[in-house]
Every structure is written in structure tokens, then in C-alpha cells.
Image (cartoon, rainbow, N blue to C red):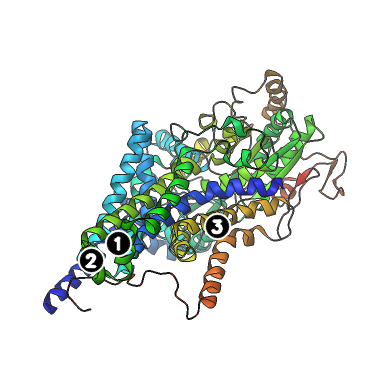
Amino acid sequence: MDFITLLLAAAIASGTPLLIATLGGILSERAGIIQLGTEGIMLMGAVSACLVYIRSGSLWAALAAVVLVSAALGLVHAFMTVTLRANHIVSGLAMTLFGAGLSAYLGKPVAGQPLPGAFPRLELAFLDGVPFLGPIFGRLDWFTWISFALALGLHLLIHRTSWGLHLRAMGDNPATADVMGIPVQAARYAYVVGGAVLIGLAGANMLLVYSPTWNEGMTAGRGWIAVALIIFARWNPLRALLCAYFFGALDSIGFRIQLEGSLIPSYFLKMIPYVVTILVLMYLGWRGRGKPSGSPESLGLPYIREQRL
Amino acid sequence: MKKRVRTFKSAIWLCVAVMLVLAGCSAGGGSSNNGAAAPSNEASNGGAAANAGTASENAGGEGGTMPKIEKPRVAFVYIGPPGDGGWTYEHDKGRQYMEEQTGLKADTVENVPESADAERIITELAQNHDIVFTTSFGYMDYTLNVAKKFPKVIFEHTAGYKTNDNMSTFFGKNFEASYLSGIAAGKLTKNNQIGYVGAFPIPEVIYNINAFALGAQSVNPDAKVSVVWSNTWFDPTTERQAAVSLLDKGADVLMAYQDSPATIQAAAERGAFAGGNDSDMSRFAPDTYMTNPVWNWGPYYTMVVKSVMEGTWKSQQYMGSMQDGMVGLAPLGAKVPDDVKALVEEQHKKAMEGTLDVFQGPISDQSGAAKVEAGKSLTMEEILNMNWFVKGVEGTIPN
């Protein structure tokens, strides 16, 4: 019982950056733009948070820097895919390589340095001693609480508001959306930039909350797991919440199995999250043969008014 | 319209190409140093070629000593960033000390993975350097391969066991300091559960865990040490997960044989005492820092470089100790009680005098079988090949 509770607490901690990055990806892909730059944008978010936080000591300044930097990266991706109609996959991959390289370079002076302070937590004294909820929700940081709200908020936005309807229309059939009077190009820009900001904040979450020291390539493939999570979650923010914590749990279960005295070599335990990603993708692909995947129908297709492609 | 599409396309490819080049330039974070590693002093490509030429002529038939080089070109290969606050940080401090003492300027390459990349980078460095320090266990075979190809270049490898006419290995008896840290941990634990984050199941880590456990048991026979393997030297995120899983299991004091202070940071968040490795890490957790072994490489690096300048360098297996100063113990944390400090200090003195015998019998292994009989001690060779845990350590060593 204790094992499960503590595993869930660890799952939320390591699942939160995955969740925020997945939400960012969903926002972008619902508008029809594939986002594969996740890993690079997360790294850039983390490194800019670290640089600004260590230099200025202000958490707000750090978060503002993350928003600016990731919005700029989102803008580049949007320009490439929406205006230039570049291949979304190529642009995203370039973004990942660019982010990984540049963040390693920029982060050199602060690599390994401790942050000036921890992210503030919300102490819920009334949960003390409550068996299950206490250990999980009693001392969570603000960032995690905001990520819960984000998942719920985006779900409501996408499925319960007319903005969401327009967003989904844009992803499924931009020509129709255009006829409805939605400014498709401008709105796509907005959603890609907004999504990139969330992805950058996911990187900042990893650095400010989860692992408070910058080091090169610290996301270690989590950006790619977030890309896979978009598909598992079928572009649905609430499902993304569950999927992210499921993978968060996988991420931290290896050490716990080791401590239970398992005979499985630790090298294999370390592969768990990646192997499961592949297995789940294979399973979903096999189960979903011939059925709609939940993917926006025009995902990855450029749109220019009155032009056939 | 079609033409416009084409110009779009070429614009895109141009953008992608530019980005890729940019990424390539900076992705090699380490290799950017490597670029700067092109010898800034008299040696140029020509010099390197000449060096290689004479090397092949004289290959073989050399004794242990190497010719005198008045101004050796020195390079260091690091596994992590010098800012890691631990292992690489101390090596880099050692390099700076050596530079001050000798007036030379060394080149460094950081973040070199223990893979075929290492061999490539060591080969590149060997082409225009006279001494190459490779500062991680996993570089051993790569260093040896390159050493055989460049018999004129001197290689110094940390923590290994393979040598060559032109390749030495050096390390120190850090297990003595691990034993002392164990004494502090054995006294500080309240529930007798101590957690240990180990990097890899190799002898170096295993004998440190054993020494630590023996130290803890010397003052607290009921102390148990649970071990998790992170399978990484430097990955703060993973190290932290390992530390949290130990804390979740109930450990109230943590120790880590890792290059980063992630374990100390994780423990501090729960108010648990912890120690790390390699360097004084108290600044990462001023209130809950315990202590840990520290390295001091500077004097050794200086000695090696000076011996090359004087022409007296010889291949050897150097084992430093607390006595000669290569190994030390970080000052005990501010919140460690005075009686614990006194206990540690008592044994610390013995280590400084060279009379501390950590692996002295009787010692039994995890199953309880006697490994070292009373009155006997392990030899240095037995210690360096250790592949078993002492009684009271909980964890497994994969084959």
C-alpha cells in the first residue's frame, strides 16, 4: 500500500514535465501542426530558466525568460510550417537538434551549479495524516498544481467552448474553418506559439522543480516520450494526464524494483520506460487497425486558401 | 505559382541546413574545446606529423622511461562538465593547480562519453599532445588502444588497472575516507537504514560501499546499507530518482558514489543527512550535509608533468592515500553533532598516520560466509578486484 502511494507521488513528480510538454504538443497538433521539436524546446526552456534564475535570483524573471525563448522557437516553427509550408517533421527535427546543441553551449557556465532556491510549495496542513492523499498532495509545489489546472482547462477549452470548436475545425479541415471565417493562418501561429511556450515551461519544470541542476541533455529523451504521449492520449488533455503519470511511474519504478531485491539486472530496469513506449505504440496501432486514431485529420498538411496541394 | 513554391522549398532547405550546422557546432559542446585544443604554442600540424613520424621509427624497444620533453603539451579528457561540483570539478582544480606549478597551459575536452567517441577524441589529442590524462574508469581500454598506436605520447588513466610502457594508471585509497564517512552515517541514522546510490557495479564502487558499511557497523552493528545502481556516473535526474526511492523505502541517511550532488539535494528536501563523493559538497545542502571522500589531484598531476619535463617519467600503477594527500575527507557538516565528529576524527588521525586497516578480518559476506578471517587483512589486489558485498549491505551485484 505504502509502495503504491509513494510510487504515485513519484509518478506525479516525474510525470509533470511530461504532462506539460504533452499538453503543449496537443495544442499545436489540434491546430494541425505537428510538433517534433519538443525535446529541443524543453532543453532551451530548462537552460534559459537556469541561466536567468542563477544570474538574477528571481523566479519570475526565469519564467518570463522561458516564455520568451520558447515563444520565439514556436514562432520559428510556425513560420516554417504555416507560412513557408515546410515539412513539419523536418522543421521539428531541426528544432530539436538546434535546441539540444544551443542549450548545451549556453548552459556551459552554469552546468552543475545549484539553483538559488527551491520552487515554492503549497503546504496543505489539513491533509497531514490522511493516508493516501496526504503523502501525494500535502506538499506539492505550485507548478504541479498549475499543471492539473492546465490539463482540465485545456480539456474544457477544446471540447466545451466555441474557441475549441474552431481549433478542432482548423486541425480537421482548415478549408472549412476558413469558410467559417476563422483566420486559419493567424490562429495556427497562435496555437503553435502557445504550445511551444507550454513545452518550454515543461523543461523549466524539470529544472526548477524536479532536478534542480542544469546539465547537458538533461531531458534525456523525455521530449520524445511526450511526443508519443500525444498519440497515446489521442489528442485529449485529460487522457494526457493519466498517460503522463503512467509514464512517470514507469520512470521511477526501476529503482523501486531494484530495492525490493529483484534479480532482474538494473540495466534492464532502466530500459522500462522506453520499451513500454514502443510496446504501447505497437499495441495501439494493432488494436486501432481501420479505426480513426483520434488524430486531427489535416495534421501535418499545409493550408493556403484556394490552393490545392 | 509553381515557381514560388520552389523558391519556398529552397528557402526551407536553406533554413534547415543553417540550423543543422548551428546545432552541429554547438552539439559537440566538448569538441568546441577540442577545436581550441589545437596547440596554441609552437607546435602546429607539421609538428604533430613529425612527432608521429619519429614515434613509428622508435616504436618498440623502449624501456619504462620516456625521453625528456621540456615543454610538454598536456591534455585532459573529462567525463562530465567541470561545473559538476564533484568528480570533474576536482580534476579541473587539479589541472589548474598543475598549470600554476608548471607554468604550462593544458587543453581540456569535457563531457566525453565512455564509448567509441572517447577513442576518437583521445586519438585526436594524442596527435598533438605529449601527455594525455583520461580521467574516468571507462576510458581504460580506449586509452590503452590509443597508447599502443602512439608510443611516444604519455597516457595517464584514472582508476583503471591496465598499463603500457607509455601508460600509467593512478588512483587513491578513497575507501579509507568512505570508512570514515560510514562512521558518521552509522551514528547519524536513527532507524539503522542507510541508503547508498552507486554508479556502476564495478570493484571501485563496491569496495567503497563495503568500506562505508564497515565504518557504519564499527559504531552501530545494526546499521544496514541498501544499495541501488543508477548505471550512470553523471545524470542528476536519474541519481535523484534513485535517492528518492531510497528515502521512500525509509532510509534516513544517504550516501552516493556519483559525480553530481543530486542525492544530497534530494535528501536535504526531506531533512535527511547525506554525503556525496569527490568534493566538499556542503554548499549544496548546508543544513544536512554529512561528509564524504574528496580528491586532490593537483600534486599528482604536477609530479607527472614535472617528471616528463625532467625525463624521469616511468609507467606505474600509482595508489595515493590519505597520508600522501591524494584522498581526503570533507569537513563534517555544520549540523553533525560533536560526539560524532570526535569519533570520526579519532579514526581520521589513524588514517593520516597510515595505521587504519579498513578490510581487516573478521569480515563475512552477505550470506554470512567468512571472507576474511580474524587477524588477516585483504591485500591491495584483493581490494581492487572486489566483487562481493559485506554482511549488512542489501543489494545485488549483477554478473
The residue type indicated by label 3 comes to Phe
Residue B96 occupies quadrant: top left
User: Residue at label 3?
Assistant: A247
The residue type indicated by label 2 comes to Met
Residues tagged 2 and 1 counted as in contact (Cβ below 8 A): yes
User: Residue at label 1?
Assistant: A166
| Residue name at image x 46 percent, y 50 percent | A17
Residues tagged 1 and 3 counted as in contact (Cβ below 8 A): no
Q: Viewed as shown, does residue B68 lie left or right of A183?
A: right
- Separation of residues labelled 1 and 3 (CA atoms): 31 Å
Q: Residues within 10 Å of mark 1 (few under 14, many from 20)?
A: many
**Disc number lying in front (2 or 3):** 2
Name the spot of residue B103 as percent of width and height, x first.
37, 36
Q: Secondary structure at mark 2?
A: loop
- Decide if residue A167 is in sight here: yes
| Residue name at image x 61 percent, y 43 percent | B244
The residue type indicated by label 1 comes to His
